[in-house]
Image (cartoon, coloured by chain):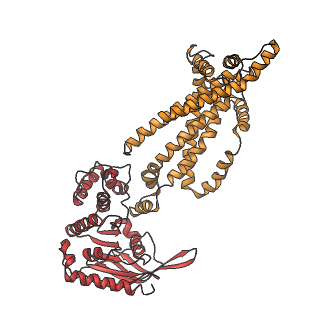
Chain colours: A red, B orange
Amino acid sequence: MSASVIEAKGVNLVFQTGDGPVQALKDVNLSVGKGEFVSFIGPSGCGKTTFLRAIAALEHPTSGILTVNGMTPDEARRKRAYGYVFQAAGLYPWRTIAKNISLPLEIMGFSKEEQVSRVERVLELVELSGFGKKFPWQLSGGMQQRASIARALAFDADILLMDEPFGALDEIVRDRLNEELLKLWNRTGKTICFVTHSIPEAVYLSTKIVVMSPRPGRITDVIDSPLPRERPLDIRDTKAFIDIAHRVREGLRAGHSDE
Amino acid sequence: MGPVLGVLAVIVALWYGAAVWLNAAWTYDQAARDGGTVTVSLLLSDTMDQERPVLPPPHQVVGELWKGLTAFNVTSKKSLVYHGYVTLVSTFSGFLLGSLLGVLLAVGIVQSRTMELGMMPWAVISQTIPVVAIAPMIVVLSNSLGFGDHLGVSNALVSKTIIAAYLSYFPVLVGMIKGLRSPDQMQLDQLKTYSASEVQGFFKLRLPSSVPYLFTSLKVGIAASLVGAIVGELPTGAIEGLGARMLIGSQFGSPIIVWAALFAATILAGVLILIVRVLETVVTKRMGVRA
């Protein structure tokens, strides 16, 4: 791995709530290298989404140092360092798929021609060529989520932040999209941070798995996956895969000893 | 269609029954004066055909309405088309003014907390004042200030416009506030990840999101405008408009005229709401809503 693109040193994040302070992240240290595929896994409340949001400058650490491409998250955002994919596709129903993908491009002030060519390119990347003129309701849930990934890719950010992007989809669609996401990652060389609830998904996709646990949200284990970059779906039946899945499960259980 | 016609049939039947019941007193009085007796057939025929019935039966109202719509030249003061047109003009001008005001206020209130704290209570209070109380004052003020003379229109139109706008801005304001605030946190976060400005967020997300809410409010607003326009015609001693017809009908003790004007207003309201609905269909279709 070459230089790290995301660097967290002693990151703490405390939310002030009506019931007093809640420690969402406690002493998080992590380094994500360029081109890595990092999954964050853990039960609800473990801070995995909060950490992703902190990288995106949607939340701000109360202490510690967090850098993205060597900058503060806020600067990194202004430099268009990352594309963010939310759990829901969040496409605007009044815009066609192509227009939805142009949305960030319009906001960032790309020229009309540039917008058209970029939309064309990312639609192809997520295998939605020819669907640009459709409206979101004319597409299945899986296709909508692919369109939202295309939207996050449209402005050439090097980092893709994904917050349970396939959480609302059924198993079969999810498998397909996982396969396609790996292909896309291989082709584009992006750095991907991926939040998930699913152990098989985390193990199948990642080069690095970050296991987290709640109260306070913290990292309990970081597993560097020995799996090769080329991963057919049936890699999930191999011993190596099952061993990592086991270690992840153990890590989750250890962090959950109070229940 | 079946259920609608069924309900209509029941209403008409009840109406006829009520007409016989309420108009019977006059028939009995007449008979007592003439020393005659009231048979069932006399009761039924007389209550259907009085000159000043307490409750005119449907066919009398429809007859008067039909006469008002078709029997006269549309520019004649006797034509309901003419009076309907007069009311329509002030309904539209009030609706446009009120909707514009409602939308602009909503934008201000959604964008600025100070504006919300400063304006919202007044907007709510404005709606607690009965329109019949404030209408005469608006009429008097419009006449003495003479805005109409500057604008080249009648002062009556100005006062009716203001009253209609006064009633219609509120539903538009409330609907637009809700609409402009309808985008969820995820959508707002998403725009943040693009470093979108407040203005971009407004035009790309908030405004389009508010369109369905806007049309719902516009339908309420245009009906309220019509009420405002009619109320604005009542206290002025106005001689034109459906409100004036109602006033004349009641002053001359002719309920048939009042009812015919009432029905004309109802038809007008239906047409107005239909217009908004057509506009809504056109706009939402262009916005890609499922047909």
The quarter of the picture where the C terminus of chain B appears is top left
Q: Position of residue A37 (x, y in %)?
A: 27, 74
Q: Position of residue B186 (x, y in %)?
A: 43, 62
Say which of B10 and A179 sits in front: B10
Residue B225 makes an appearance in the image: yes
Q: Quadrant of residue A243?
A: bottom left
Q: Nearer the viewer, residue B47 or A192?
A: B47
Q: Residue at x 52, y 33 (%)?
A: B6
Left or right: residue B79 compared with residue A198: right
Residue at 63% across, 19% down: B60
Q: Is residue B237 visible?
A: no
Q: Is residue B99 left or right of residue A8?
A: right
Report the residue at 44% width, 58% height from top: B197
B33 left or right of A151 in image: right
Quarter of image, res B229: top right
The x and y percentages for residue B205 are: 43, 53
The answer to which image quadrant residue A54 occupies is bottom left
The residue at 41%/80% (across/down) is A65
Q: How many marks?
A: 0
Q: Is residue A65 above or below residue B132?
A: below
Location of residue A159 with respect to A26 vertically, above or below: above
The answer to whether A95 is drawn above or below residue B43 in the figure is below
Q: Is residue A30 left or right of residue B164?
A: left
- At which x and y percent is residue A63? 47, 81
